[in-house]
Amino acid sequence: MGKAIVRLKDIADKTGFSTNTVSLALRESPRIPAPTRVLIQQAAAELHYLPNQIAKSLVSRQTMTIGLVLTDITNPTLTHAAQAIELALAARGYGTLFATSNNTLEEEIRTVEMFRSRQVDGMLIYPTSHRQLDHIRPLRRANYPVVLLVADPDAGIDAVCVDERRGAWKAVRHLIEMGHRRIGLVDSAARHGNSEKREGYLKALTEAGLDYDSKLAADPSGHTSKHGSAGMDELMSRKTGATAVFCTNDSLAIGALDWCRRHGVAVPRDMAIMGFDDIEYAAFAGVPLSSVRYATREVSEMAVERLMELIAAKDALPQARVSLIDPDLIIRDSTRLGA
Amino acid sequence: MGKAIVRLKDIADKTGFSTNTVSLALRESPRIPAPTRVLIQQAAAELHYLPNQIAKSLVSRQTMTIGLVLTDITNPTLTHAAQAIELALAARGYGTLFATSNNTLEEEIRTVEMFRSRQVDGMLIYPTSHRQLDHIRPLRRANYPVVLLVADPDAGIDAVCVDERRGAWKAVRHLIEMGHRRIGLVDSAARHGNSEKREGYLKALTEAGLDYDSKLAADPSGHTSKHGSAGMDELMSRKTGATAVFCTNDSLAIGALDWCRRHGVAVPRDMAIMGFDDIEYAAFAGVPLSSVRYATREVSEMAVERLMELIAAKDALPQARVSLIDPDLIIRDSTRLGA
DNA sequence: CCAGCAAGTATTAGCGCTAAACTCGGACAC
DNA sequence: GTGTCCGAGTTTAGCGCTAATACTTGCTGG
């Protein structure tokens, strides 16, 4: 770890005060008179002193570090969130330790343990599965500050997240309003047990008096554009008569768009396509993509704020609260009939 | 930090051994006979013991944590790299602390100090500017393991990165081979003093006997698609007669592509466009985008491997080495004349 | 004129852990 | 029988820091 590190003791030796006096002076304690304080601080600066946070953490019992568990940082949405979260935490003096669970529960559990072992002051988690939270509940019970970034309202754990159900419902309702009756669903989250978007889809169908046809749902094994294309393949080979498709994220949708281009299916004339997340590239896809947008920055900021509240609450966490942010539709050419 | 944490002492009290015996047993010391070891390990498991890494770090003088400094995680390329790095580090038992410098030198310096204060065992850095490394050199001189993820070959600091100069040179040479003589450059990195891609561009021009015309270079204030579009605007308003444009990353190129679509400029017939990084969406842009690709995963893996070597070297770091990875061209419709 | 107090500083203990030094009771050799 | 060695632990010290307590002065007031 590099060469001899400068410690309080070194400043003490240099100035002739005791280590404790130095410690107090550097922390602006009123118990040390101003002239002494200045003297010590100058000596510290000359020696290029940097406090050892590890030692500090051991005694103060807080590390000023938050653990961020992501499923997969490749997803542009998570990426934006991670950035916004790091920013919000840094502004409050917290460091961000991050790890990806690779969408497996096992790794998620390992990650959470690793973070605990490193004594993070709290965690922000994108759980792999929104339902299997049994490894997280004990944490909350032990008064450990945890905020989820996707969740069920009835999870019993604090969460700040987008209302995916409502977003999906809005998206599908829009497709229905555009006159579509046979609406496909390309959903890569289902296999992780995350059914919010699918529920929104079903709700919109039901409200419009449309039947759900399981042939209209594809369930590709990942969430990249390649998978979106594969999902389209699966869907279209079934000859379901679909005239619109709702993809649960924009990467999938962009892949679906590409499938249409390669198969001579005109978008939106022959097929309307709707995404979710409104990533930067949605607007620049072959056909500009309609999508569901939400304020990543605000969500992240709120989640961090909530985490801070929990940390401040010490050993009496308040009742768990789930905040759902209502997303908005962004309509572009991929679903605009006149286009 | 949650409720009463289980310490070695608690296991000691429960089993009747001393804390030190417990510590040794949990670390599989041969000094403790197997039956005792098992007994102690069972007790630890029952109490749900998790070692306190902070305390461990204080005495072992290593935190098993690496600091990762990114300029801006929004960039899909950095994102991929971050993911690959986290994976490679986790595989070696290291945690990843990350922070973004927001492309300012000041924040980069603060971040590096913060990491040092947290006693990270080493750092991986995407420097904001490839030239201003004066805050990093002292680290190396103090035997602090640091590996850069972009750099000059003569930086005097270890680095593992893509050979951007060569990538740009290949890209521009390709455009020249396609018959272009007036080739624009949209480069958002120049303002940070990172001129590798521009140098590659110039080298290709020179080799082909083409003059450089400064009117052909645009320097937008950011690296998103919006900025790419703005860069095109700037370039085209100058009536330079450009028939091709090299954009220093894919987001810019996708923005440029969009500018062409909106202004009725046919790609590649009236204008060829070339990107850099080959992000997922390059293939799915309005016109599939030609780009420069490199193996992110391998680069990250190599960088981590190098960092491990430096860490293992203790207080006698080997001569700094810079490894440049040679990227490949991916030709798609945006530069293919026949398309 | 000295108890009482405050200001300024030093000493001590301890966070949870590890490494080094130490103890103690056999077994064994001669 | 006694010195030596070994196995199976225990005790002690210390990582760099903070918090609590202790100790000096010099002063004030009754």
Image: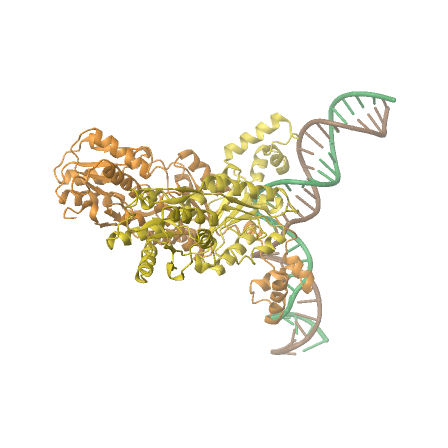
Chain colours: A yellow, B orange, C brown, D green
Asked whether the viewer can see residue B80, the reply is: yes
Q: Residue at x 56, y 31 (%)?
A: A41
Q: Which residue is drawn at 66% across and 61% down?
A: B12
B61 over B260 or under it: above or below: below
Residue A137 falls left or right of residue D2: left
Q: Residue at x 29, y 46 (%)?
A: B277
Residue A61 falls left or right of residue B212: right
Residue D11 falls left or right of residue B132: right
Q: Position of residue A91 (x, y in %)?
A: 50, 37
Frontmost residue, B96 versus A246? A246
A129 over B33 or under it: above or below: above
- Residue A211, located in which quarter of the rendered image? bottom left
Frontmost residue, A288 versus A236? A236
Q: Position of residue B215 (x, y in %)?
A: 20, 30
- How many numbered marks are there? 0
Q: Where is residue A45 in the image (x, y as percent from the top left)?
A: 51, 32
